[in-house]
Amino acid sequence: MRKTKRTLAGDALSNLMLDLFRLNSLLLTAGDRLVAQLGLTSARWQILGAIVAAERPQPVAWLARDMGANRQNVQRIINDLHKEELVAFEANPHHRRAQLVVLTDKGRRTFEAAMELQAPWVNSLADGLAVKDLETVHRVITALRDKLEGSDEPEVNPDR
């Protein structure tokens, strides 16, 4: 059996992926600490952000899709946010059972408070990094995300 070797680009991407996994873990931990005083976690904050970013109220399944997250996990967190009166459910004129999720006034205030905490933190984190470099990383991550979203299965080609 022939062992397939990675290309130089494949090696570089593998190293980047490992760093991104570690970075994601560090970001979630830092986010949890940053918004803990507001009764939020990174996951709750992210969902509030997805609701704010949506052009109109959406059902849980659409929010999960937009976030690239598991619908059941998003539903569980939204249920918790609902208990804490940060979100509310509205009737969906297009689907009887898939209610629309909207921020309450309390939810909007909490999200805005989180963003007030985030601004100085992210500015400090970005200090010393070149905007051009950050924009390049963003383009690379977006291109990789687009490739992954366009396929259901990892491509395996033993001839490469």
Image (tube, helix red, strand yellow):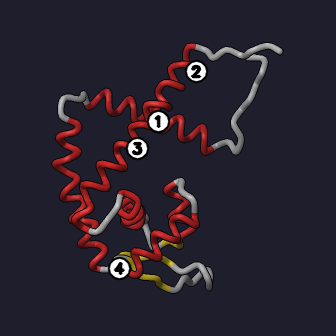
Disc 3: CA contacts within 10 A as few (<14), some (14-19) or many (>=20): few
The residue that label 3 is drawn on is: 25
The residue that label 2 is drawn on is: 10
Could you tell me residue 124's position as x and y percent?
17, 40
The residue that label 1 is drawn on is: 141
Disc 4: CA contacts within 10 A as few (<14), some (14-19) or many (>=20): few
Residue at position x 23%, y 53% in the image: 118
In whole angstroms, how far apart are the C-alphas of marks 4 and 3?
A: 26 Å
Q: In screen coordinates, is 119 left or right of 28? A: left
Q: Secondary structure at mark 3?
A: helix
Could you tell me residue 133's position as x and y percent?
32, 27
Q: Quadrant of residue 95?
A: bottom right
Q: Please say if 30 is above or below 90.
A: above
Give the mark, 1 or 2, whose residue is nearer the N terminus.
2
Q: In screen coordinates, is 44 left or right of 12? A: left
Quadrant showing the N terminus:
top right
In whole angstroms, how far apart are the C-alphas of marks 2 and 4?
A: 45 Å
Mark 4 or mark 1: which is in front? 4
Could you tell me residue 111's position as x and y percent?
28, 66
Give the mark, 3 or 1, whose residue is nearer the N terminus.
3
Could you tell me residue 83's position as x and y percent?
40, 81
Give the mark, 2 or 4, whose residue is nearer the N terminus.
2
Mark 2 or mark 4: which is in front? 4
Amino acid type at circle 1 is Ile
Q: Please say if 89 is above or below 21.
A: below
In whole angstroms, how far apart are the C-alphas of marks 3 and 2?
A: 23 Å
